[in-house]
C-alpha cells in the first residue's frame, strides 16, 4: 500500500501585497468605538477626521436637481467638463494657479487621487520621502506601488514641520517622490510660503523628484494665506496638487476629490483610474459644481467654529500634566506628545507601554476614542479630533483628565 503523501500546510490565498498592508488605524479605532456604542456604552468618538456639520443646503439642492434632471448615467473618467472647468476657476480664484481642464482628474475622494498619483509615478524600489507625522494611508499607498518609504520627522519645536535642509539631506539617486499635507493631518501644521519656497529651491536641484501636495484641509486654516508648492515656477511642472470637498464643504459621504498636474501626469492618473473605478458619481459631481460656484462662505462659517473649538480644547489640555501640545494652525485635530505616561501602571495593573496602550486605556476607562500616533509616524503622540460639538469636547477632555490622573 503506497504511503500517504504528507499534506502541505494550508497557506493564505491572499496576495503578499495585501498581507503587507495594514488597516488604517483611524478606521480600526472607529470600529472599536462603535462596538462599544452598539452595547449601549456612551463613547465620545474623537478618532475620526470628519466634520460634524451637515453639507450646506445649496449643495444638497443641486444634487436633488441633478436627480430630477435624470443625470444618472456614466460620466467621463476624469470628471464632467463642467466640474473640471470650475475646478480650474477655483485654482485661479483661491490659489492664483493656472490650470486647464485636461490637467484635472476628478476622483472618488482625495484618497483615490493620491493613490492614482502614487501608482502612476512610483516604480518598485523607488524611494518616496514622506514628511512625518503623516496621514495614515501615505505609507500604505507606497507599499502598494512597491516603493520604499523614507520618513522625515519634523520637530515639536517647529510644529512638526520638516525643513528644506532635512529634505535635501534625504534625497538620493533613488528618490522619485515627496509627499506631504498642509494643513497637516494629524498635526494641524501649515507650511508658510517662505517654507515652501525653500523646499522648492531644493527640489529644483533634483529634476527626477516629483512632489505630491495634499491640500484637502486648505480651507480649514487659522493663520491666513494658504500657500501651494505649485506656486513656484521652478518646480510647478513636477507638483501634483490634491484637494477635494470632504473637509471644506462637509461632504465626506459624497466621495469627491481631484488632482491637478501637468497634462501627461494627469493623463496617466486618468488611465489608472479608468481600470479601477472610472468616473465618480454623476450626482456628486453636479453637487461639486454647485459647491465651488458657491465660493467658500459656508466653509468660512465652519472654520470659525473649528477655531473656537481648537481654542476651547487647548484651554483644557494645558492643565493636563504630561501633554505637550503644539497649537494647530489648521485642520481640526490636536496632536499632543504623551510619552510622560509611558511606563505608568493602570488601575487594573497593566502597564502603559506606548501610545497605543494609552489610547486603549482612554477608550476603556474614559470612554473616549482617539488614535495612537504610531499610525502617523509619531509613536509618542495621540491624535484627537476636535470636530465635535463644544459640549462633547468639554465632556471628553474632562473624562480624559480624570482617567489620566489614575495612572
Image (tube, rainbow, N blue to C red):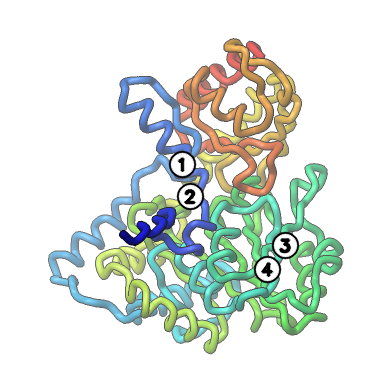
Label 2 – label 1 distance at C-alpha: 7 Å
- Looking at the picture, how far across and down is residue 222, in whole percent? 62, 47
Q: Residues within 10 Å of mark 1 (few under 14, many from 20)?
A: some
Q: Secondary structure at mark 3?
A: strand
Q: Which residue is mark 1?
A: 28
Q: Secondary structure at mark 1?
A: helix
Q: Which residue is mark 2?
A: 23
Foreground mark, 2 or 4? Answer: 2
For marks 1 and 4, the one nearer the N-term is 1
For marks 4 and 3, the one nearer the N-term is 4
The disc at residue 150 is: 3
Q: Are marks 1 and 3 in contact (CB under 8 Å)?
A: no
- Looking at the picture, how far across and down is residue 174, in whole percent? 74, 77
Q: Residue at x 46, y 70 (%)?
A: 258
Q: Are marks 2 and 1 in contact (CB under 8 Å)?
A: yes
For marks 3 and 2, the one nearer the N-term is 2
Compared to residue 367, the image places residue 7 above or below, namely below
Looking at the image, residue 127 sits to the left or right of residue 248; the answer is right
Q: Nearer the viewer, residue 215 or 207?
A: 207
Amino acid at each position: 500500500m503506497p504511503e500517504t503523501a504528507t499534506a502541505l500546510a494550508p497557506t493564505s490565498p491572499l496576495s503578499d501585497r495585501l498581507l503587507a498592508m495594514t488597516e488604517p488605524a483611524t478606521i480600526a479605532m472607529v470600529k472599536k468605538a462603535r462596538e462599544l456604542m452598539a452595547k449601549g456604552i456612551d463613547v465620545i468618538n474623537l478618532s475620526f477626521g470628519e466634520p460634524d456639520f451637515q453639507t450646506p443646503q445649496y449643495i444638497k439642492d443641486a444634487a436633488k436637481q441633478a436627480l430630477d434632471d435624470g443625470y444618472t448615467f456614466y460620466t467621463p473618467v476624469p470628471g464632467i467638463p463642467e466640474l473640471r472647468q470650475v475646478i480650474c476657476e477655483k485654482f485661479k480664484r483661491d490659489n492664483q494657479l493656472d490650470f486647464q481642464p485636461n490637467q484635472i482628474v476628478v476622483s472618488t475622494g482625495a484618497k483615490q487621487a493620491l493613490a492614482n498619483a502614487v501608482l502612476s509615478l512610483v516604480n518598485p524600489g523607488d524611494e518616496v520621502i514622506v514628511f512625518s507625522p503623516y496621514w495614515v494611508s501615505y505609507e500604505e499607498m507606497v507599499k502598494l506601488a512597491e516603493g520604499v518609504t523614507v520618513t522625515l520627522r519634523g520637530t515639536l519645536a517647529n510644529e512638526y514641520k520638516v525643513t528644506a535642509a532635512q529634505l535635501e539631506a534625504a534625497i538620493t539617486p533613488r528618490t522619485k517622490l515627496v509627499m506631504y499635507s498642509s494643513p497637516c493631518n494629524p498635526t494641524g501644521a501649515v507650511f508658510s510660503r517662505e517654507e515652501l519656497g525653500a523646499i522648492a529651491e531644493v527640489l529644483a536641484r533634483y529634476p527626477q523628484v516629483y512632489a505630491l501636495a495634499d491640500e484637502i484641509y486648505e480651507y480649514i486654516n487659522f493663520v491666513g494665506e494658504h500657500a501651494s508648492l505649485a506656486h513656484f515656477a521652478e518646480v510647478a511642472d513636477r507638483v501634483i496638487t490634491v484637494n477635494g470637498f470632504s473637509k471644506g464643504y462637509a461632504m465626506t459621504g459624497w466621495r469627491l476629490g481631484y488632482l491637478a498636474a501637468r497634462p501627461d501626469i494627469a493623463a496617466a492618473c486618468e488611465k489608472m483610474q479608468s481600470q479601477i473605478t472610472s468616473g465618480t458619481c454623476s450626482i456628486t459631481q453636479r453637487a461639486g459644481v454647485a459647491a465651488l460656484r458657491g465660493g467658500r462662505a459656508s466653509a468660512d462659517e465652519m472654520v470659525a467654529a473649528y477655531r473656537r473649538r481648537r481654542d476651547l480644547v487647548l484651554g483644557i489640555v494645558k492643565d493636563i500634566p504630561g501633554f505637550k501640545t503644539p497649537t494647530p494652525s489648521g485642520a481640526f485635530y490636536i496632536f499632543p506628545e504623551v510619552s510622560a505616561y509611558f511606563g505608568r501602571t493602570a488601575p487594573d495593573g497593566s502597564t502603559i507601554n506606548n501610545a497605543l496602550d494609552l489610547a486603549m486605556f482612554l477608550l476603556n476607562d474614559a470612554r473616549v476614542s482617539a488614535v495612537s500616533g504610531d499610525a502617523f509616524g509619531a509613536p509618542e503622540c495621540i491624535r484627537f479630533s476636535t470636530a465635535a460639538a463644544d459640549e462633547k469636547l468639554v465632556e471628553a477632555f474632562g473624562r480624559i483628565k480624570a482617567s489620566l490622573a489614575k495612572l
